[in-house]
Image (spheres, rainbow, N blue to C red):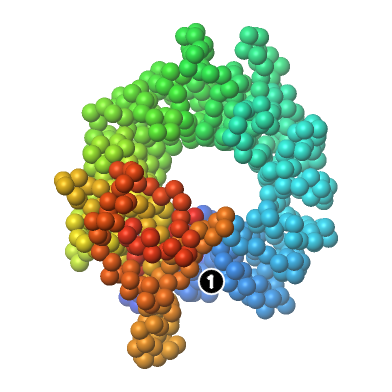
Amino acid sequence: MSLFLVCKNRHTVKGSVQELHENNYPKNQRQLVMGASRLSPATAQNIATWLSDKERYECLFVNRAWNATFVPIIYRTILITSRNQRRLLLDRLVKSEKDGSIGFMVKELRFTDNVGISRDDFELLPKLCPFLEVLVFPPSVWQHLRCSKVLTRWKYLHTLPVLSREKLANYCLEIFGDQLREITFDGQLVEELHQRDGFVPMFSQVHWLTSLTISGKPRFNSYQNKLCFDPKAISAIHESCPFLQSLSLSWQTLAIGPSSQPHTLVGIQPAPKMQRLKLQHVQLDDPHWIHLFVHKYPNLASLDFYNVNWTENTHILSAKRHIAYQEAYIAIAHNLKKLRVLKLNKLEQHLWPNLLFFDAIESAGTMLNTIEILPQHNYISPTITSPAAFQEMVQALTVDARSVSFKMGVDDMYPSDMLVVLEAHCPYITELDLSGSGVLELDLHTISLESILDRFLNLQSLRLQNFDVEAQNKRGLPVDTHCLKTFHLAKVWLTNDHVFCYLSVRCPQLSDMSLDDCTWRTNKPSMNIKIDMPYHTFRKFGVRSMHIAHHIEGIWTRLEDGTIFSVTEVKRNRQILGRKGPRAGQNGWYRIDSGMTRWYHLYQFKDGLRLRRLELRDIEMVKDYRMKLSDFEKMFEHDSMPSRTCYNPIEFWEDDIPCGYFTFRCHSIDMFIYDFVVL
């Protein structure tokens, strides 16, 4: 048991599990580890949080005691990401229905947005999983289900899927009432209840609610058409739900009244239970709202303002009014001393107190472990993104900070300097999001992937934007592995495939990767963007707007983003060859098209995009193409940096060949997304 108590990270736990399988493991130490079977369920659950799904599964085969300890943990939470997985789960639950050995363990069942559930399967769930506590599926599934009688059979359900219809919401609140702990209201339901002031009275039935999410419909016009909350409505929600710990508002307007009238905090009762506040796509009519939040939620641990706008035209305000906004932000730093997560997005330079904000955090003794300070989209603020601001922001973090997000400015600050400062203050971060200041290729700073991974050994999520990313090709060379799991690139320039060769060797646990509007330099006549990671199992891989850049007349010139790609799964190929025998690969059509390497073309179909499989003759045409001068001049006739504004229909697919093609190889992949279309 003590073996786990001294584990500081998941790698130590993983090594301990692997050592149990070795025959030469010392007997006395093996007996000590076997004592882990006497751990309480809560302690075992805490240990399991440090392990991946594969490592938890390996724990089942250590011995019978470990199997009995980890089986309930594995089956407690189930995430369904595909129809095949849903079918296999239901078959397994039906087979074990007699003894209930599996269904009784399932407490949380979640379906991703691309997976639904039929009426018949839904009606089986209460019988197969009677102790279910959390059920989440896409809101669109509600309209296909007869849920009136089925829901009543769950006695412990406290978290429901998103509710977007008034009749359904009223029925669910009537059935479960105070049993509910987490609710999400969305779409038409929110709008209808706002129009007749019937929204706040609904909360009188959910006294023990701890998490509430209210999301209206996206509105891109004036704020008057958005759903409106005032301080009285916020207070009424907390009076009905005194145990509320998390509140999230999206696509709302918070209106406190004309700025000419004096605002006061008298009569505003604090809600000491509140821990997390998130405002997303919300408009505030007065900076006094920030003072109100600070006063009402003194124990906030997480504050997230994502794309929060002001209804006032802040560019024509007086200097006195600007100071009022700055004082509101400073109030956050002065009063929220228990704050640990701070995310402020889309800040305006003239409203942000800059260094005064971080001075207030330091004087208050607030110890942040996650911080995100970002200016307006595509806008470089000389104060918010300055080196001094970065220094102050990093110093406001604790030594064991976990997440940092920052956008570089136009000052003489290079990525290497930022990494040195960050490593000195926060060497244990697990999430890093850095954005460069350049837009054109000549303006981009170069950042080394090796320097990031060598400095931050605990990094699990990395996002880089507006950089020239480079790495040494380490394939075949010995290198220390890294625990990076998530890697996102946006608006970056790459030279050949060295970055992905390096990731393939250095980061064996990488399972989530996305490439957004990236550009691939090439001096070769080939039109191929190649990513070869044959040993990686990806949970999700996304690609959007991949470009090829050719060096012409001393300038790197970028082509339109391609719409042709291929996917190769090594595991799938082995399974096909195993079923078909050694002669399976002799037929050229089968080898290329029927499972070995799948080629696709993205085309316009009516109002949406679709993917189609390419035939052998089409594949050969794509591979044999070389850029001609006439094609090049045609592509750059109207734009020196062309970007696709529309997609070609299927009959004109050959016009997409000059844009190049993308090839991807991995061991296996659960979800592949190309320009928002799921394969």
Residue 481 on image: x %, y %:
29, 59
- Residue under the point 26% across and 45% down: 468
Task: Name the residue: 39% across, 37% down.
Answer: 405
* Number of numbered tags placed on the structure image: 1
Residue at the image position 54 percent from the left and 60 percent from the top: 605
Q: Nearer the viewer, residue 314 or 198?
A: 314
User: Against 381, is 640 above or below?
Assistant: below
Q: Position of residue 406 (x, y in %)?
A: 37, 35
Secondary structure beneath dot 1 equals helix
User: Can see residue 171?
Assistant: yes
Specify whether 292 is left or right of 670.
right
**In the depicted view, which residue is nearer to us: 187 or 658?**
658
The residue tagged 1 is 67
Mark 1 is surrounded, within 10 Å at the Cα level, by few (under 14), some (14 to 19) or many (20 or more) other residues, namely some
Residue 512 visible from this viewpoint: no
Q: Residue at x 26, y 27 (%)?
A: 411
Q: x and y percent of residue 539 in the render?
A: 46, 62
Depth check: give the residue in front, 340 or 144. Answer: 144
Taking 195 as reference, is 317 left or right? left
Is 484 left, or right, of 645 in this rendering? left
Seen from the viewer's position, the closer of residues 19 and 302 is: 302
In the picture shown, does residue 597 fall above or below 500? Answer: below
Q: Is residue 213 above or below residue 98?
A: above
Three-letter code for the amino acid on which mark 1 is drawn: Asn
Quadrant housing residue 421: top left
* Residue 400: quadrant of the picture: top left
Across and down, in percent, residue 580 comes to 43, 89
Q: Residue furthest left?
A: 554
